[in-house]
Image (cartoon, rainbow, N blue to C red):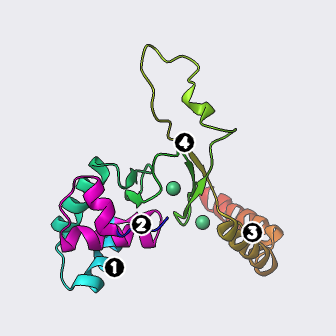
Amino acid sequence: MTFSPADSLRQHGIPATAQRLAVLRAVSSRPHITADDVAEIAGIQIGTISRQAVYDALGVLVDKGLIRRIQPVGSAARYEGRVDDNHHHLICRECGRVVDVDCAVGAAPCLTAADDMGYEIDEAEVAYWGRCPECLSEEQESTLVDSSTRPRQDRWSAASQEISNIQPAKK
Ligand SMILES: [Zn+2]
Ligand SMILES: [Zn+2]
């Protein structure tokens, strides 16, 4: 699939400005990119681009379906060029890393809600929250360091020491 960013803008009926092209290229270069990072990368490409111009361009591209916006709870919005396949995301609670994951089983079964309440459903957005392998292995390492430098037993005896120091003073 070879198409230039300018072509895909035209195909979607969006006038191709330098700013929109730079923003689209930035989103294509890094999946799940934040607006801040888009501004930085687009700025490197075309010199200066205002934060507002970045948000405007992102808004147009999302509206026209060229890119998709995901909004993890408690985190900055992310933008990606992978659209229309109903894929989902794994999100790390600790470092915020976001990765793609395909639909739970086969082709978009999650579009079949337990009860659609009369809605016509066209998209299901699933965020699987947890901790990424990097954060898990970092935690395991730091647990090892913690237990070797400060054994549990010491904390307990230190605490009971304090209590026994306080009690006589109350009398
Ligand atoms: Zn992580
Ligand atoms: Zn994605």
Q: Between label 2 and label 3, give the one nearer the viewer.
A: 2
Whole-angstrom CA distance, mark 2 to mark 1, is 10 Å
Give the mark, 2 or 3, whose residue is nearer the N terminus. Answer: 2
- Mark 2–mark 4 CB contact (< 8 Å): no
Q: Secondary structure at mark 3?
A: helix
Give the mark, 2 or 1, whose residue is nearer the N terminus. Answer: 2
Q: Secondary structure at mark 1?
A: helix
What is the crowding at mark 4: few (fewer than 14 residues within 10 Å), some, or many (at least 20)? some
24 vs 108, left or right, is left
Find the magenta span and give its range.
5-34
Q: Residue at x 22, y 53 (%)?
A: 13
Whole-angstrom CA distance, mark 2 to mark 4, is 18 Å
Q: Quickly name the residue at label 1.
A: 41
Q: Is mark 2 within 8 Å of ligand 2?
A: no
Q: Quickly name the residue at label 2.
A: 33
The quadrant of the image that shows the C terminus is bottom right
Label 3 sits on what residue type? Arg
Residue 155, label in figure: 3
Q: Between label 1 and label 3, give the one nearer the viewer.
A: 1
